[in-house]
Image: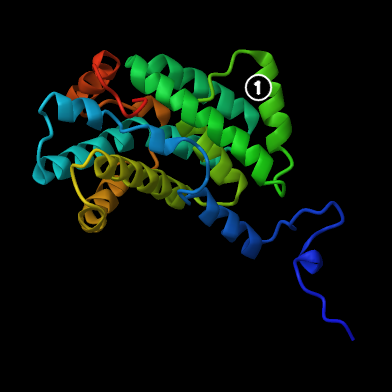
Amino acid sequence: MEEKVGNEHNLDKSGNFPVTGSVLQWSQWQLLDSILPTGGFAHSFGLEAAIQARFVSKPEDLQAYVINVLENTGSLLLPFVYSTTISPDIETWHKLDRMLDATLTNEIARKASILQGSALMRVAAAVYLEIPSLKPMRSTSLSSGTVSFHHAPIFGLVCGLLGMDAETSQKAYMFITMRDVISAATRLNLVGPLGAAVLQHQVAIVAEDLSRKWMNRSVEEACQTSPLLDTIQGCHAYLFTRLFCS
């Protein structure tokens, strides 16, 4: 008797994976995988401008910079991730997208948020076929012409649809922010790969504290805690040479 191999026994009649807790967990992990083509590695979160401005020049400066980026992420963006995670519907997403678009005054950060959010929504609609609402939500939003596709609300939306709880989704957003800014530091030759791994492990303790500090807040409480970083990132467009988009 011929042994059957492959995943044909795991697919439903439409050729998609069934929506079960165990399968959704694999999708949740994939959302945090650096191989997911959402464009996060094209952005340095202002680090490239900070290096050229001599604001960051050594590993000790880098650690402080990463912590400040995480603090700013927690205070400004986690409320948007939280709100869409607990209410992952198109009305909530569109409302929070408009609010965040009005909140971001740094044009460089604003464009980076839109680029990454648009990429994430495109990838999620194409990959997570077990969530059939993603494709029509994206199509409706594109055709409306009124949605900017900012990253934080879309990340929370996808997390909510994938069954993540609010605490996990917010910590996940802090994790990918920490991962991407430290990766940018490696490519800018500020720290080596091993040093970057050590730094990420050390900062994780601070990231946990910051996550709990800013967790489960409403969007009305969103604020900037590190305006200097926002100013530095705004100078990125004026750099003579640039490796990153922001």
Q: Give the residue displayed 84% in from the left and 51% down from the top.
A: 14
Q: Give the residue displayed 67% in from the left and 15% down from the top.
A: 144
Residue 234 sits in which quadrant?
A: top left
From the image, tell me which residue sits under label 1: 141
Q: Give the residue displayed 81% in from the left and 54% down from the top.
A: 15
Answer above or below: position of 47 versus 100: below
Q: How is the image coloured?
A: rainbow
Q: Quadrant of the C terminus?
A: top left
Q: Position of residue 104 (x, y in %)?
A: 37, 18
Answer above or below: position of 176 versus 98: below
Q: Is residue 102 left or right of residue 16?
A: left
SS for callout 1: helix
Q: Position of residue 76 (x, y in %)?
A: 33, 30
Q: Give amino acid for label 1.
A: Ser
In this view, the residue farthest toward the bottom is: 1
Q: Give the residue displayed 10% in from the left and 36% down from the top.
A: 57
Foreground pick, 88 / 194: 194
Answer above or below: position of 153 versus 101: below
